[in-house]
Amino acid sequence: MVTASVAAPTTAVEKATGKLGLVPLVALVVGSMIGGGVFSLPQNMAKGASPGAVIIGWLITGIGMLALAFVYQGLSTRKPALDAGPYAYARAGFGDFVGFNSAWGYWLSAWLGNVSYVVLIFGALSYFYPGFGAEGNTTQAIIGASVVLWATHALILMGIRQAAIFNVVTTIAKLAPIGLFIIIVLLAFNLPKFNFDLWGFGTPDLGSVMAQVKSTMLVTLWVFIGIEGASVVSGRAAKRSDIGRATIIGFVVALTAYLLVSLLSFGVMTQSELAALPAAASMANVLEQVVGPWGSVVVRIGLVVSVAGAFLSWTLFAAEIPYRAAREGILPDVFAIENKNGAPAGALWITNILVQIFLIVTFYANSTYLALFYIASTAILVPYVLSGAYALKLAVTGEGYGAGEGRGRDIFTGALATVYGVWLIYAAGPNYLFMCALLYVVGVPVYWWARHARGEKAFSGIEALIGAGIVIAAVLAGYLMWTGAISAL
């Protein structure tokens, strides 16, 4: 009786205000993190690492992402006036232009990631209809992806809450085949096979253990992108305390699934066998090895449902961040347009038009899921580093803390999250960093346009130096691409 009387008012508030409660917030976090990446983990991880190096990679990532989860949990309650997560924290801590770059980088990562998601959906469906192609970038696949894109667009225009409720359903549906995979592969796990060449010394092409660990970093980052999901939509949360709770719950669920899927696979197939699998839906091949073709079918269906749910979550995030930034004068006003249902229509239209353009680019450039997710992963590093740095800044200065309130844990987690982000930038390597510079430099005139339209000065002091640095990096990237030193998509 007590539980019912407490739960009922919250539900009533959610329905009356259109706000999101704990369950849809958790679903947004889990749904955005557990997308297509988990279904590709066996091959993605084995491609450049042995089982021992994979364990170290997950240990580093787990600690780093836990610190980032604590950062978002703490900031959501310590700075309740700041909505839209990474963008809001970067702007509050380091000024308008830095905040803009956080919003711009996050937005780039979100919609580029969405391109990779729909490519992955149709790559998985090629098992049933070969015309889609194993990489999901044939003419038929691009047409199918476009239909998915604009159907999702229409759903979100109906309202954020309706889309979030649909996301709860897809999140539950996606966890079922993952759970089935874990149970079956656990029963079939072969310890001698797992221990065979545990550190990759018998495979010289893998390199040193440190090189192997480094190779896992962007993969492990990619599957955790979305940990900030509840913070991104914090302005639409029914209860502020639910934001932090949803973040931690989502982190635990995702980490458990990732660890078990990637490590148990080494007990079914060797590193070289896993590395030779197709990148998309390699989890299906592992389960097929144990139970036959029906296992592959189940996983591929689960992948389609999972990625569709993640695509919905990330379409929400890709619209929400620029919408919030535009309302505060950091992006042009067109991004702040709302429709009658309260959906961020302006940002949504711009975002999905760009996704459509890049879907066509994937056809002509023959781009793959892996290339797209590496670029999307690298683009989001700036927002993550700035979030950790802002939490560290608050803890060091004492801003927002009461007299005598302990700050030691927050100093530690803020510093750890920042260092982890910097390590990821190093691990990304120059190729993808230079590619991101080309994407970030496009934002410089967009920022100037937004500020000029409001009659405000765009750059001052250190902001001008940051802008100049982005332009120089982009020019260098263009030169290196022209000379063939780095590759395009």
Image: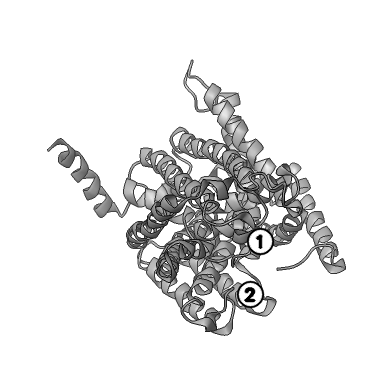
Q: Amino acid at mark 2?
A: Thr
Residue 135 vs 271, above or below: the answer is below
Q: Name the residue nearer the viewer: 477 or 19.
A: 477
Going from the N terminus, do you reach mark 1 or mark 2 first? Answer: 2
The image quadrant of residue 298 is bottom left
What residue is rendered at 56% in x and 36% in y?
63
What residue is rendered at 58% in x and 27% in y?
412
Q: Name the residue nearer the viewer: 165 or 447.
A: 165
Q: Nearer the viewer, mark 1 or mark 2?
A: 2
Q: Which residue is mark 2?
A: 362
Q: Quadrant of the N terminus?
A: top left
Percent position of residue 248, x then y: 43, 40
Residue 29 in view of the camera: no
Secondary structure under badge 2?
A: helix
The image quadrant of residue 389 is top right
Q: Which residue is mark 1?
A: 446
Residue 377 vs 94, above or below: the answer is below
Q: Quadrant of the C terminus?
A: bottom right
Q: Name the residue nearer the viewer: 435 or 370.
A: 370
Residue 69 vs 19, above or below: the answer is above
Q: Amino acid at mark 1?
A: Val
